[in-house]
Image (cartoon, coloured by chain):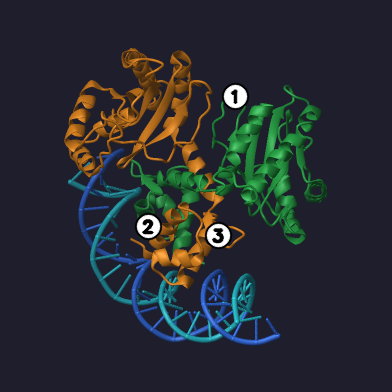
Chain colours: A green, B orange, C blue, D cyan
Amino acid sequence: MSQTVDRALSILPLLAEGPADLGRVAGRLGVHKSTALRLLRTLHEHGLVYRQSDQRYRLGARLFALAQEAMENLDVREIAHPHLVRLNEQCGHTVHLAVREDSEVLYIDKVDSRYPVRMYSRIGKPVAVTVAAVAKLLLADLPEAERRAVVEKLDYPMYTARSTPNAAAYLKELATVREQGWATDFGGHEESINCVAAPIRGADGRVVAAMSVSAPNVVVTADELLALLPMVRRTADAISDEFSGRTPAKDPA
Amino acid sequence: MSQTVDRALSILPLLAEGPADLGRVAGRLGVHKSTALRLLRTLHEHGLVYRQSDQRYRLGARLFALAQEAMENLDVREIAHPHLVRLNEQCGHTVHLAVREDSEVLYIDKVDSRYPVRMYSRIGKPVAVTVAAVAKLLLADLPEAERRAVVEKLDYPMYTARSTPNAAAYLKELATVREQGWATDFGGHEESINCVAAPIRGADGRVVAAMSVSAPNVVVTADELLALLPMVRRTADAISDEFSGRTPAKDPA
DNA sequence: TCGGGGTGTTGCACTGTCTGCAACGTTCAT
DNA sequence: ATGAACGTTGCAGACAGTGCAACACCCCGA
């Protein structure tokens, strides 16, 4: 909608592929060198782009700062975190928290069994939206029309033999998930990893986030993991209550 | 340098503070609502901004994706990582890798003693540049004039009684560091945390990154930590060699 | 049911900002 | 020395971005 900004922002993914010099940037954008220079300068002033010693440009540090700040300001995450930790202490497995953004789903928190520290390593990289248990919950909650539209546009990579093969199969799966109010992924992403997930709902009942417990086959069987479902749902419900203001966490005054 | 882009980019830090509606954004930017709307739309199309269900805007997922991609494209980090892991296995303490960007220094990798996973949790938040051992190394290598200019512009917060108090003191410290080729931080940032650091140099001898080992007082004394210096320097040198192409890591054909 | 204040949105004419050009400066390699 | 390749600057013209005003919408209280 705004040409100049559009061009400037197009530079970012371009640089994400690796450092590039002025000529290359101008070429890829299809604009004159001087134009590219001015855009890069503006990006540079805002710290989104950095000029390394060989004069080539690459993405800048402010990008990390912004990503981190944004992360810390997600209210669901803040509310959910202590609950996730508690669940992790109880069951010992890896716990994930995820939200949807248009047709993408991303993890915004994770508690690992052995070392209870938030790691953002997988954040940003889109979750495998056609197979992940949390993704199913988040998509299943969309209104019929939107859900259909999103599902049709997706790719269906066969990570394993048990991956969701196509849109029709996914819609069916989503219908099931929608009805039962929880979801699983049994080896659909990685052969030996299973997940069970439950939705977190806002005051209006809509799904605002989803959480899951994951564990490899070698540690617990799919059935044993499924036995944890009640615990997962209890946690998700507790977060829902707190998030929608029904249960003031602390400071009940 | 480019007004439109400048305005658009100014929105990002604004949204990093938390979600905001159109009016608020327009107000903070000092532009008409319609202008702000168009800018936000453009940002939205690029996925840098997301519109949540209550119509307010917040930072979007593409930002995380970009930050992560940028991170993965840092060649120093890639080369250094296995060395950091090895050092961590040997000494057991937390190992950091950092680079400089203008007058900021940021961690780009970390290996923690108990759980050897890269965590990006601190990435983006600028390192305490006036006290961190890695920052000293990176600034000490700047040419005289530039170093002076940078140092004068810094703030000197007194994190502890042993923090660098002012520009003069810092210049002196940098001179020492420059000469001896390594750096320390003994409780300058947090009272009970000590660090020793060594520089990583490119083919031209300039410092391209710095690495450090940190440990709390209660685990090892400052003297004991200092005894690890040779090991840290050997690691840093090994990374330097590989980075500057003197030691092909693998595939020597 | 009606109106008022608060949003976000659209179309339009104007002007100011961005664009591409061409010339210059620099740094390399030959 | 000479040339090529690259980044940089100033300028005039054109077009993209701006602000305005009117519109559409929602929620609230009357």
Relative to the observer, which residue lies in front, D27 or B147?
Answer: D27
Residue C24 left/right relative to A103: left
Number of callouts: 3
Q: Nearer the viewer, mark 1 or mark 2?
A: 1
Q: CA distance from mark 1 to mark 3?
A: 39 Å
> Relative to B217, does residue B99 appear above or below in the rendering?
below
Helix or strand or loop: what does disc 3 sit on?
A: helix
The residue that disc 1 covers is A114
The answer to whether tags 1 and 2 share a subunit is yes
Query: The residue under label 1 is which amino acid type?
Result: Arg
Q: Is residue B72 visible?
A: yes
Residue A202, x across and y down, in percent: 66, 53
Residue labelled with disc 2: A33
Mark 1 closeness class: few <14, some 14–19, many ≥20 residues within 10 Å: few
Q: Amino acid at mark 2?
A: Lys
Residue drawn at the location 81% of the way across and 29% of the way down: A223
Numbered circle sitting on residue B45: 3
Residue A128, image x and y in percent? 67, 42
Chain identity of mark 1: A
Q: Amino acid at mark 3?
A: Glu
- N-terminal of the pair, mark 1 or mark 2, is 2
